[in-house]
Every structure is written in structure tokens, then in C-alpha cells.
Amino acid sequence: MPIFAILIIFSLSFYVFYKVKFFRCNRPVEKKWISAKSSVALGSFVGLFGLNQLFLYQTTVTYIVAAIFIVLGIANIIGGIRAYKYYLPLAIDEAKQAN
């Protein structure tokens, strides 16, 4: 499925983008907020990769590995979204205090 390949590339590029942004940032709460966004991107990469493997190969081992990747991806996305929601107001306050 070419759509999964495109989405995998996008999620990987967003992960790299946010990691570069993470290392260039100086404020501690904003770093955690950006790290949460990169966690969502990494989770989508892992989950989409597992989903893509389900369509490419039809073996028992593939089903097991793909299920593990999908579960880890969903867990990473959920954890990243929770951290994003937690750090967003703190990052806004930190940015207001910096100016």
C-alpha cells in the first residue's frame, strides 16, 4: 500500500523535525512539550510500520511482530498526547514570562 509508505515517511520526517527543534530549544518546559510532539510522531511511525507489514507479508511471525509494533505505537501516541496536553499551558506561561 503506497499510502502507508507516504504516511511512514511523513511521520518519520516530523519526528526528525521535532528532535532537531528539541535540541535547539533553550526553555525546559518547551523542550518537554516538543518532546511530547516528537513522541506522537514516533508512535505514528511505529504503528504505521506495523500496519504496513500486515499488508506486505502474511505469516504468523509477521502478525505477532506487527501487533507488537501497533500496540507500542498506540501507547506512544497516547502517552505523547497526554504529555502534550499537560505541557501546553505550562509552555505558554513560560513563553509569556520570557518576553
Image: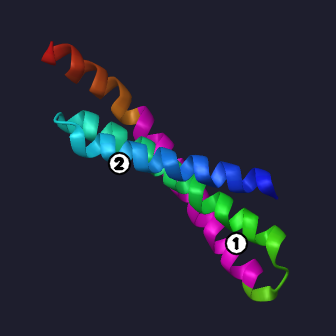
Residue 95 appears in which quarter of the rendering?
top left
Crowding at label 2, few (<14), some or many (≥20) Cα neighbours within 10 Å?
some
Q: Picture coordinates of residue 29 (x, y %)?
A: 24, 35
Q: Vertical placement of 14 versus 8: above or below? A: above
Q: Is residue 21 left or right of residue 95?
A: right
User: SS of the residue at dot 1?
Assistant: helix
Which one is in front, 45 or 98?
Answer: 45
Give the residue type at disc 2: Lys
Q: CA distance from mark 1 to mark 2?
A: 26 Å
Q: Earlier in the sequence, mark 1 or mark 2?
A: 2
User: In x, y percent, where is residue 55?
Assistant: 83, 68
Badge 1 crowding class, 10 Å Cα cut-off, few under 14, some 14 to 19, many 20 or more, is some
The C terminus, quarter of image: top left
Residue under the point 42% across and 50% down:
16
* Residue 55 badge: none
- Numbered range of the magenta stretch: 62-85
Q: Which residue is mark 2?
A: 19
Q: Residue 35's image quarter?
A: top left
The answer to whether 84 appears left or right of 90 in the picture is right
Q: Is residue 6 left or right of residue 96?
A: right
> Residue 81 location, x and y as percent?
50, 41
Question: Mark 2: which secondary structure?
Answer: helix
The three-letter amino acid code for the residue at tag 1 is Ala
Residues 74 and 45: in front is 45
Q: Is residue 94 above or below residue 70?
A: above
Which residue bears the numbered disc 1? Answer: 67
Image quadrant where one finds the N terminus: bottom right
Residue 92 x, y percent position in the rendering: 30, 20
